[in-house]
Image: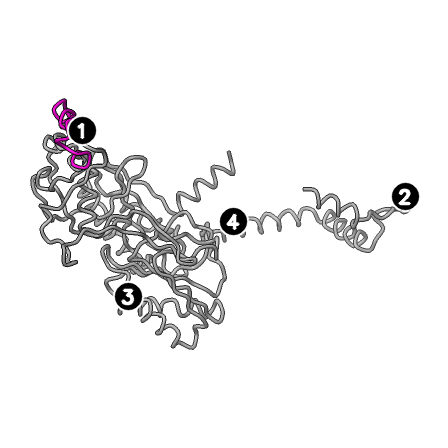
């Protein structure tokens, strides 16, 4: 704010103008005056030609590609790679290494950069950031030019889906539509996850019948159903023991995947500190019924006059009292069993309601608006139970928000 006006005064000098010089006598003004005089002389013909050109321009609006956020003419794409929930990071690393070796063997590919766990930070602002997860990875691929990238994109897509069928893979270009993960999205909201799953299957069937939708990109934003350990919490027994639901959850987590307790840095790498409960020989605990459940707060319900008297007379030491207050209880004493059941791994919510988005991308050369227009009536014909709603999101929502802000 200080340098711009200061240096402008020093470097930008205003030339002194000769007030006696006649304006508008240059050759450009003379040519413009001659053309304007000719057009006014044939004003009727000029008006007819102008109206015809305007009508032709309005008629040809149908030939304009209706893309609110066009892709950049960039010779680089990024590949999103995601395995089902529960897959280990070593499997992701091995797959990314195989894909990288294959890409580098192609003459059209100049460079490949891989990232595991999350999107590389601070390298580009015109793209969405993927969710950090152990089963997620990315590949950034450089080509010779934009035309080569466009030609190789379907080739790479076929390779990824044929050789890695268990993974969700998607090749994405760069554009300003960074808020939505897909350009074509319809969102269903309601209370029951099973009903939302059924609505998603119906919508995905309509998406697959659309000739302009890329079949490799048709999916929803929920994870596959997976198995989970579910403890039948006994509220009365837990209250007597001074144990809460979070205490039980922390105990099960420590005995299985591990309980995060902190983190530290090795150079620029962040490393998590995880506490795990194991058997004396270091093996994993198979029977969870008797794992210790530690209380976050000491249980002082058993402290009475007798306890204080025993401490004062030396019958009970302070260490013995502390051990009684903070000693764990077995999991079986505060639950009615632990079962392995199927459940939804991820249930997304919008404004407090469960929501599932059915998503896709258009085939190269076609616009998201055309994909949506082709199946609009079929999607709206899906029967929605009471309390369930469907709304178009993705680029359609972003376009509506932008236009409302413009004409506000």
Q: Earlier in the sequence, mark 3 or mark 1?
A: 3
Tag 2 secondary structure: loop
Label 4 sits on residue: 58
Tag 1 secondary structure: loop
Q: Residue at x 16, y 58 (%)?
A: 282
Contact (Cβ within 8 Å) of mark 3 with mark 1: no
Where 245 sits versus 83, above or below?
above
Tag 3 secondary structure: helix
Q: Residue at x 26, y 56 (%)?
A: 208
Quick one: 169 or 251, which is closer to the camera? 251
Label 2 sits on residue: 19
Q: Which mark is residue 161?
A: 3
Q: Earlier in the sequence, mark 3 or mark 4?
A: 4
Q: Earlier in the sequence, mark 4 or mark 1?
A: 4
Q: Nearer the viewer, mark 4 or mark 2?
A: 2
Q: Residue at x 73, y 43 (%)?
A: 5
Circle 2 Cα neighbour tier, 10 Å, few/some/many (<14 / 14–19 / ≥20): few
Residue 140 lies, in percent from the top left, at: 42, 64
């Amino acid at each position: 704010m200080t340098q711009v006006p200061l240096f402008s005064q020093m470097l930008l000098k205003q030339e002194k103008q000769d007030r006696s010089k006649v304006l508008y006598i240059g050759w450009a003004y003379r040519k413009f005056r001659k053309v304007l005089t000719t057009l006014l002389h044939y004003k009727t013909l000029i008006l007819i030609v102008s109206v015809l050109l305007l009508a032709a321009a309005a008629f040809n609006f149908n030939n304009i590609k209706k893309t609110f956020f066009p892709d950049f003419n960039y010779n680089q794409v990024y590949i999103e790679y995601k395995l089902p929930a529960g897959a280990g990071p070593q499997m992701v690393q091995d797959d990314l290494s195989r894909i990288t070796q294959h890409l580098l063997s192609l003459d059209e590919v100049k460079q490949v950069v891989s990232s595991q766990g999350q999107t590389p930070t601070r390298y580009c602002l015109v793209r969405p950031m993927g969710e950090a997860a152990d089963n997620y990875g990315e590949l950034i691929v450089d080509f010779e030019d934009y035309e080569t990238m466009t030609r190789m994109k379907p080739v790479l897509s076929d390779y990824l889906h044929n050789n890695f069928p268990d993974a969700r893979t998607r090749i994405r270009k760069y554009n300003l539509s960074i808020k939505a993960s897909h350009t074509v999205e319809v969102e269903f909201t309601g209370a029951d996850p099973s009903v939302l799953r059924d609505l998603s299957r119906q919508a995905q069937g309509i998406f697959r019948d659309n000739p302009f939708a890329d079949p490799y990109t048709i999916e929803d934003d929920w994870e596959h159903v997976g198995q989970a350990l579910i403890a039948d919490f006994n509220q009365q027994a837990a209250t007597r023991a001074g144990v809460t639901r979070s205490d039980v959850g922390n105990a099960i987590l420590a005995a299985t995947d591990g309980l995060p307790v902190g983190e530290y840095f090795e150079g620029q790498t962040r490393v998590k500190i995880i506490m795990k409960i194991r058997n004396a020989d270091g093996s994993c605990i198979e029977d969870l019924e008797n794992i210790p459940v530690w209380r976050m707060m000491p249980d002082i319900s058993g402290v009475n006059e007798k306890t204080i008297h025993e401490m004062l007379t030396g019958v009970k030491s302070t260490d013995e009292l502390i051990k009684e207050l903070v000693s764990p209880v077995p999991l079986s004493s505060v639950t009615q069993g632990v079962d392995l059941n199927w459940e939804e791994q991820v249930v997304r919510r919008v404004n407090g309601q469960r929501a599932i988005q059915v998503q896709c991308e258009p085939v190269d050369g076609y616009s998201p608006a055309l994909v949506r227009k082709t199946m609009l009536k079929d999607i709206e014909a899906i029967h929605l139970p009471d309390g369930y709603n469907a709304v178009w999101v993705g680029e359609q929502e972003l376009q509506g928000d932008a236009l409302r802000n413009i004409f506000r």
